[in-house]
Amino acid sequence: MEEQFKEYAKLLVEVGVNIQPGQNLVIASPAECAWFARLCAQAAYDAGCREVIMDWNDGPLARMKYLHAADDVFDSYPGWRADFCNGFAREGTAHLIIAADDPENLKGVPQDRITRSQRSAGKALAEFRRLQMCNGFPWCIAAIPVPAWARKVFPDRSEEEAMSGLWSAILSAVRVQGRGDAVERWREHLDTLKTRVDKLNGLDLESLHYTNRLGTDLVIRLPEDHVWAGGNGVSAAGVPFIPNIPTEEIFTAPLKEGIDGVVYASMPLSHRGNLIDKFWMKVQRGKIVEVHAEVGEEALQAAISVDEGASYFGEVALVPYDSPISNQRLLFYETLFDENASCHLAFGEAYSECIKGGTEMSKEELKECGLNDSITHVDFMVGTADLSITGQTWDGREVPIFVNGNFVI
Ligand code: ZN
Ligand code: ZN
């Protein structure tokens, strides 16, 4: 497997954040994954990176803190830590985020502590977040297995078998086959996504109507100058990068107050260490006015109440039901993978690249265009094998976009 691990690390550094000679790289990684972070650091130096700066984290320690730290800890955010994040973002430093989480790491932790700490971090890291959402610096999120996660995905296997099962599922999802051609395969994949993005942008859609047998019946209006995007983003310095590896989605922003109807989730959502499952939402004039979840309803309520924008939508993403990830028919309990196996929506902040000229606009200008603003952005999956999406164009034509879960354009 050693060769595949190196190829994966190289892919994340050279295509994911697309590190440039002389550029700095921040790697955020669980301490447990230090060996893989080292492979990424080596790949970065090989590509001419100036300095790799490590930002370690640890799931079990985070859990311990939520359970035992003094209560006022969750209402503040360390200044030095804000300077670290905002400062590197301002300099255009590349950020590689290695995700490797126990999907239920924060199960049983007081929800109120999670929400308060998210609000404090949201305020302190506003600049980091603004720059991230407008591609001010190149960033890439990717994942590697850890035992607690692997056991959740393969509960019937031994730890060792679960780990190797999750590794092969991930490597196949990210097109790393140990033949040294992952970078090449990604270029082809990005071309395919771009062709579809161009088609959607050519349609000039006014709205989308989602229906399926789960009960989803939702109309989503789009801003007049919306832009579909997918595959790579382009940083402020003009360098292409891929925010998520894998990525199969084509996405845009909805009109903040332009969504009405009912939407059912098609997969569980692991959000901030809590599992939310079998849920649906009622939406009126863009606002989520009612939610029900058989599992994790409290966590879902909290997630949409973090701030005003958290109960409005920020993303509409199309993923064919027959994508390489969804064809594995595996529930990853990790949004990075599950969202690329299914059409999804996100409540919370919209990406400014989803509106013409948006990356140059102020928050106020983005709001005027109808884009939602929030400190949060949470994707959840809505795609099913029978999902139908019909588009309505500005000149009144009806265009089938999805039939039986797959693109028909
Ligand atoms: Zn998405
Ligand atoms: Zn998203």
Image: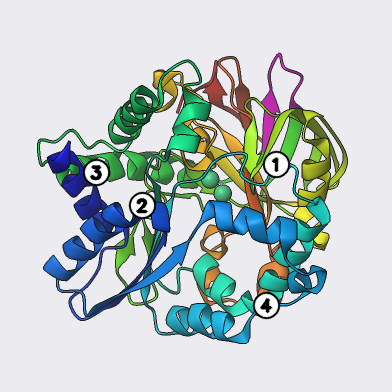
Nearest the eye: 297 or 210: 297
Reading the image, the residue beneath label 2 is 33
Per the model, the C-alpha gap separating discs 3 and 2 is 24 Å
Q: Which residues are magenta?
A: 208-217
Question: Compared to 121, does 215 lie above or below?
Answer: above
**Between discs 3 and 4, the one toward the N terminus:** 4
Q: Is residue 214 magenta?
A: yes
Per the model, the C-alpha gap separating discs 2 and 4 is 25 Å
Badge 3 marks a residue whose secondary structure is helix
Per the model, the C-alpha gap separating discs 2 and 1 is 22 Å
**Between discs 2 and 4, the one toward the N terminus:** 2
**Three-letter code, disc 2:** Cys
| Disc 4: residue Cβ within 8 A of ligand 2's nearest atom | no
Nearest the eye: 227 or 383: 383
Please name the residue shown 18% across and 61% down the image. 43
**Between discs 2 and 1, the one toward the N terminus:** 2
| Residue lying furthest front | 68
